[in-house]
């Protein structure tokens, strides 16, 4: 009987540690803001030559469960993205995976705000099945808009706007 209890406790602890490790693999809103600001500076400094580095799904701009992407809102196209399917897409073809509502325009509008902005939508999550709620931070980078997001079912764009309104 004691062996069964001990094995049960050990299994429970292992599951708890695994869940904690998984949670550590989720990007935070603060990380997203910092990475987007760093990426925007790189795009401003490097121009078109800097864009290729954002296409690498194992590169500097992809981390934990998210990635940075670059949009050209003037031409309405996705300029850089780690998914070859999304790179080059018309921004008006970006559709919420649950509602079908277009959100490319909202991403561009958020990037026009002085300190950037946040947009909520359902999207595929790297390494996970199905569609997940994503809240993306968008910031202007000269002639482009740079963005990345957190996959989170609880936090809202409105809450995150307060973080970046400064």
Image (cartoon, rainbow, N blue to C red):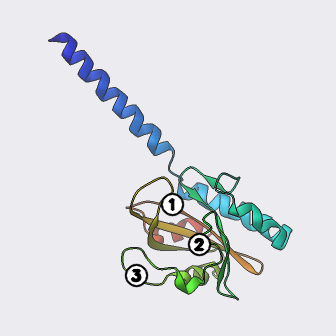
Looking at this view, is 159 or 14 the one in front?
Answer: 14
Compared across the picture, whether 8 is left or right of 122 comes to: left
Compared across the picture, whether 153 is left or right of 141 comes to: left
Quarter of the picture containing the C terminus is bottom right
Looking at this view, is 15 or 139 the one in front?
Answer: 15
CB under 8 Å between callouts 2 and 3?
Answer: no
Q: Residue furthest left?
A: 1
Q: Is label 1 or label 3 in front?
A: 3
Q: Which residue is mark 3?
A: 100
Q: Looking at the rendered structure, which numbered label has been put on residue 139? A: none
Quarter of the picture containing the N terminus is top left
Residue 158 seen in the current view? no
- Chain-order first, disc 1 or disc 2: 2
Compared across the picture, whether 47 is left or right of 166 comes to: right
Name the residue: 48% across, 52% down: 127
Q: Looking at the rendered structure, which numbered label has been put on residue 150? A: 1
Residue 92 seen in the current view? yes
**Label 2, label 3: how many angstroms apart (C-alpha)?**
16 Å
């Amino acid at each position: 009987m004691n062996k069964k209890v001990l094995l049960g406790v050990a299994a429970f602890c292992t599951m708890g540690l695994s869940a904690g490790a998984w949670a550590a693999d989720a990007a935070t809103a603060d990380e997203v803001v910092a990475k987007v600001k760093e990426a925007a500076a790189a795009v401003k400094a490097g121009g078109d030559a800097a864009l290729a580095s954002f296409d690498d799904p194992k590169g500097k701009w992809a981390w934990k469960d998210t990635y940075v992407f670059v949009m050209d809102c003037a031409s309405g196209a996705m300029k850089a993205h780690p998914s070859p399917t999304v790179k080059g897409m018309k921004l008006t073809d970006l559709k919420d995976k649950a509602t079908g509502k277009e959100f490319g325009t909202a991403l561009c509008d958020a990037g026009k705000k002085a300190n950037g902005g946040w947009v909520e939508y359902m999207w595929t999550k790297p390494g996970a099945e199905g569609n997940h709620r994503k809240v993306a931070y968008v910031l202007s980078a000269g002639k482009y808009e740079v963005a990345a997001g957190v996959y989170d079912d609880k936090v809202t764009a409105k809450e995150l706007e307060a973080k970046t309104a400064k």
